[in-house]
Image (tube, grey):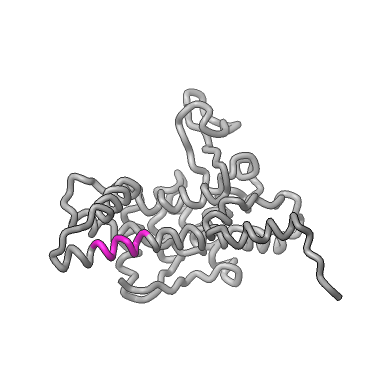
Amino acid sequence: MKRIILPGLLAALVVACEQSPEQQAQSQNLPPLHEIENVQQKKQTFTDFITPLIEASNSKILQQRSDVEAINAKLIAGSVLSNKQKQTLSELSELYRVEQSLDEKAQVQQLLVKVDLIPPALVLAQAANESAWGTSRFAREGNNLFGQWCYKKGCGLVPLNRNDGANHEVRKFDSVYESVSVYMNNLNSHPAYKGFQQQRNQARASGELNAIELATQLSSYSERGQAYVEELQQMMRVNQKLWPTRTPIIAG
C-alpha cells in the first residue's frame, strides 16, 4: 500500500528536520497535565515532555563550555585571543555574572566553574516540586515551572496570596523551554548557588554528577531551606526509575 503524505504535513516535517534542537524545544507547549488523573501516567508525561527541553539547554551550555575551554587553551599557550574570542568571553562573562574587570585568565577560571551541565534529575525534581507536576496556575498560564519571580509590574502573574506591600510577580515566559533555560542559567550564575557550582566542578574528576548530593547546595532556593532540600532528595529517590540520579560527565 502506497503511503500518501499530505503537502501540509510534508512541509511541517521538513521544517521540523531543519530546526535545531533548541528551536524545536522552544516550540513545545505544556501538555494538559492537570487533566491526567492517573499519577504514574502524569509523572511519565511530565518527564517525557521536559527531558528534551533539559537536553537542549544542557547542550547549549556545553557548547558554551567548549568555547571557554578553547579560550583557556589559547591563554595557556600564551597566544592572543582573536576578536571573536574576546567578544565570546565578554558575552559569557556577562551572562554568567563574572566581573569583566578581571583579567582574561581569571574570567576564564570562573567560567569553567559556572558553565557546566545540570543533572536532569535535579531539574525534573525542582520543576515537579515548584509546579505541582506542571499543573500549577503559573505553569499553565505563564510557562513557569520553577517559581521564578520578577519585580516589574506586568512582568508576570500576581500570586493570589501575595503579602500586603509585596511587589513581586511570578514571571511569564514565552515558552516552557525559556523557563528551563533561565532557571538553569540562574543556578549556574547566581552567587547564592556558588556552593552548587563549586561542588559540581569538584565532582568532574569522578566522571559523574550525583543529583542527590548536589541538591544539598540548594537550600537558598526556597524559604524552607533544608526542608526543601530534603524534599527534593526524597522526590528523586522515589522517582529514580524515571530520573536516573547519576549523570556521566567528561572531565575537562
- Residue at the spot 34% in from the left edge and 64% down from the top edge: 66
- Residue at the spot 54% in from the left edge and 34% down from the top edge: 156
> In this orientation, which residue lies closer to the viewer: 115 or 72?
72
- Residue at the spot 52% in from the left edge and 47% down from the top edge: 179
Answer with the quarter of the image where residue 125 lies. Answer: bottom right
Check the image and name the residue furthest to the top. 165
Residue numbers of the magenta segment: 64-71
Q: Is residue 59 magenta?
A: no
* Residue 118 picture location, percent across and down: 43, 61
| Quarter of the N terminus within the rendering | bottom right
| Quarter of the C terminus within the rendering | bottom left
> In this orientation, which residue lies closer to the viewer: 161 or 115?
115
- Residue at the spot 15% in from the left edge and 63% down from the top edge: 79
> In this orientation, which residue lies closer to the viewer: 96 or 79?
79
* Residue 147 picture location, percent across and down: 52, 44
Q: Is residue 68 magenta?
A: yes
Answer with the quarter of the image where residue 70 lies. Answer: bottom left
153 w.r.t. 115: above or below: above
* Residue 127 picture location, percent across and down: 55, 53
Answer with the quarter of the image where residue 10 lies. Answer: bottom right
